[in-house]
Image: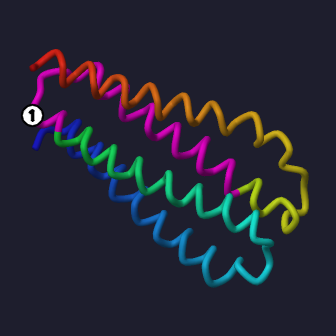
Amino acid sequence: MNQSARTTMLFAAIFGGIAVVIGAFGAHGLKPLLNDYQILIFEKGVQYQFYHSFALGLTALMQNMLDDARRLNIARWLFTAGIICFSGSLYLLACRDLLPMSVAWAGPITPLGGLGFIGGWGLLAMSAARRG
């Protein structure tokens, strides 16, 4: 496996592991403290973090198979930024009542993470089409 693919697979494994920890923390530690809507928002963050951990794994496989380093490296960073911005902002917004500071600023960050996800998938599609 080439170095870019190894790095991307490392990102996939780290974000996947963190999703398990955050999901368990939400289910067992936060559930009694949050209302149903907040739990739903928190779970949506975990769900999208998992999906895009798998997207990073797919990116790593493509980096190893295809000679499209530039697009696929950008896809890695877009998925990473998407996980941090989209899922991270949902975690903060779901827990806003438990935090000692305002996290209202996180609301506008969520769609930026979504754009990162969309861009990452678009680059994967372009890389695959270029070889097909």
User: In the image, what residue occupies the spot 26% across and 19% down?
Assistant: 126
User: Can you say which quadrant of the picture contains the C terminus?
Assistant: top left
Q: Amino acid at mark 1?
A: Met
Q: Percent x, y for residue 12? A: 34, 52
User: In the image, what residue occupies the spot 30% across and 21% down?
Assistant: 71
- In magenta segment, residue 86: yes
The residue lying toward the viewer, choosing from 83 and 6, is 83
User: Dot 1, crowdedness within 10 Å: few (<14), some or many (≥20)?
Assistant: few
Taking the image as shown, residue 70 lies to the left or right of residue 27, namely left
Taking the image as shown, residue 28 lies to the left or right of residue 69, namely right
The residue lying toward the viewer, choosing from 2 and 29, is 29
Query: The residue tagged with tag 1: helix, strand or loop?
Result: helix
Q: Percent x, y for residue 61? A: 17, 42
Q: Percent x, y for residue 102? A: 90, 51
User: Can you say which quadrant of the picture contains the N terminus?
Assistant: top left
Which residue in the rendered view is the most extreme toward the front?
A: 36
Taking the image as shown, residue 90 lies to the left or right of residue 44, namely right
Q: Which residue is mark 1?
A: 65
Tell me which segment is drawn in magenta. 62-91
Location of residue 32 (image quadrant): bottom right
User: In the image, what residue occupies the spot 85% across and 68% down?
Assistant: 98
